[in-house]
Image (tube, helix red, strand yellow):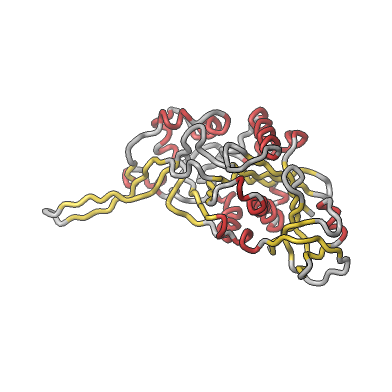
């Protein structure tokens, strides 16, 4: 069984291992001990801060395999991006080129550098050990964040977005970066991705081209990966798309991976979540599984288990209550998986 809880400093070695195994392209989860330690510290500080509106808070959660008490996954939320420096994306749009004399009217796809996502909350860093990438574990880790957001709406914006990993290989080759970014940054994709994760983003604004990039001028290999999801992120993407996230023609400036967005109030887990009391029932019948959350901020916990929704609350087994460190009558939050 699995449990999601906030990250702590004792989790740092496990997070280092996860970051090293994740490979290239997950910019917001770099394989850098100091940066990961900072992310844990920021999460702890954010959970201990009274918030009336979103700011530069960030939250980091880990997935625990309860049979061994081992950290096997991680995910996070940035309350608001683009506070210290703009958050850049490419917006895919069209430029019209027409000649009435020649009776030619062409609509040319182009990439426009923008920071339209600045000021918005972002889901980040979902990484799970290969051996634990089951539908149950991935759905639990991804959707636990949504229960946290539903419980604390004042800490986040009314819209969320997610950057999905774009095409690159294990050696650090990205067709899109090779065709575009490397000409302006004079470095390979691996180094640019790493620098973006461990330093401030001012170098992006200083070096990126200011004018639209006409897509047909790029090599065909680069054109083919614009908006394409890396195969390692396809299952994560499926969960988010099922939740209600949609692609609005924004892509990452490094690997051209798609960004997807949604209003919080439209997300499946958020609209179906309920709150009430935990009830005890050791003779549960059925196979309906629920996401079940307890705790508030630094004691927030989420698991998945078979349960029975009743008028008075949600009936759980003793084992599930023990996993969440709650008692009968405790206030809980749940949503059907």
Residue 170 can be seen, yes or no: no
Residue 322 higher or lower than 197, as above or below: below
* Residue at left offset 61%, top offset 50%: 153
**Outermost residue toward the bottom?**
285
Q: Which quadrant is the C terminus positioned in?
A: bottom right
78 sits left or right of 2 in the view: left
Q: Nearer the viewer, residue 24 or 284?
A: 284
**Outermost residue toward the front?**
52
Residue 137 can be seen, yes or no: yes
Q: Nearer the viewer, residue 123 or 235?
A: 123
Q: Nearer the viewer, residue 83 or 87?
A: 83
Q: Which quadrant is the N terminus positioned in?
A: bottom right
In the rendered image, residue 69, in percent from the top left (x then y), is placed at 82, 45
Instruction: Specify the quadrant of the image occupied by residue 175.
Output: top left
In the rendered image, residue 104, in percent from the top left (x then y), is placed at 18, 55
* Residue at left offset 35%, top offset 50%: 93
In the rendered image, residue 249, in percent from the top left (x then y), is placed at 42, 51
167 sits left or right of 269 in the view: left
Q: How many marks?
A: 0
* Residue at left offset 58%, top offset 56%: 240
Instruction: Specify the quadrant of the image occupied by residue 304.
Output: bottom right
In the rendered image, residue 239, in percent from the top left (x then y), is placed at 60, 57
79 sits left or right of 147 in the view: left
* Residue at left offset 63%, top offset 60%: 269
């Amino acid at each position: 069984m699995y449990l999601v809880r906030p990250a702590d400093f004792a989790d740092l070695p496990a997070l280092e291992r996860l970051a090293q195994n994740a490979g290239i392209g997950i910019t917001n989860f770099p394989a850098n001990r100091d940066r990961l330690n900072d992310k844990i510290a920021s999460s702890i500080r954010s959970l201990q801060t009274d918030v009336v509106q979103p700011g530069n808070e960030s939250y980091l959660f880990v997935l625990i395999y309860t049979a061994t008490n081992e950290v096997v996954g991680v995910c996070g939320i940035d309350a608001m991006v683009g506070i210290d420096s703009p958050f850049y994306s490419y917006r895919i749009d069209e430029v019209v080129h027409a000649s009435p004399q020649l009776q030619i009217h062409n609509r040319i796809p182009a990439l426009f550098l923008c920071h339209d996502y600045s000021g918005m909350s972002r889901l980040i860093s979902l990484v799970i050990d290969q051996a634990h990438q089951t539908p149950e574990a991935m759905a639990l880790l991804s959707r636990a964040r949504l229960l946290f957001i539903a419980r604390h709406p004042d800490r986040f914006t009314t819209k969320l977005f997610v950057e999905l990993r774009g095409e690159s290989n294990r050696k650090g080759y990205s067709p899109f970066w090779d065709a575009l970014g490397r000409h302006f940054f004079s470095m390979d994709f691996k180094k640019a991705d790493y620098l973006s994760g461990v330093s401030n983003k001012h170098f992006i604004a200083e070096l990126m081209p200011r004018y639209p990039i006409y897509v047909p001028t790029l090599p065909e290999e680069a054109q083919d990966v614009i908006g394409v999801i890396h195969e390692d992120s396809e299952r994560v993407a499926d969960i988010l798309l099922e939740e209600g996230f949609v692609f609005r023609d924004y892509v990452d400036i490094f690997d051209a991976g798609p960004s997807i967005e949604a209003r919080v109030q439209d997300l499946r887990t958020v609209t179906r979540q309920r709150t009430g009391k935990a009830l005890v029932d050791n003779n549960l019948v059925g196979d309906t599984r629920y996401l079940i959350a307890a705790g508030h901020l630094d004691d927030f916990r989420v698991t998945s288990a078979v349960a029975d929704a009743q008028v008075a609350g949600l009936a759980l087994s003793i084992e599930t209550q023990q996993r969440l460190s709650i008692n009968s009558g405790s206030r809980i939050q749940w949503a059907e998986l």
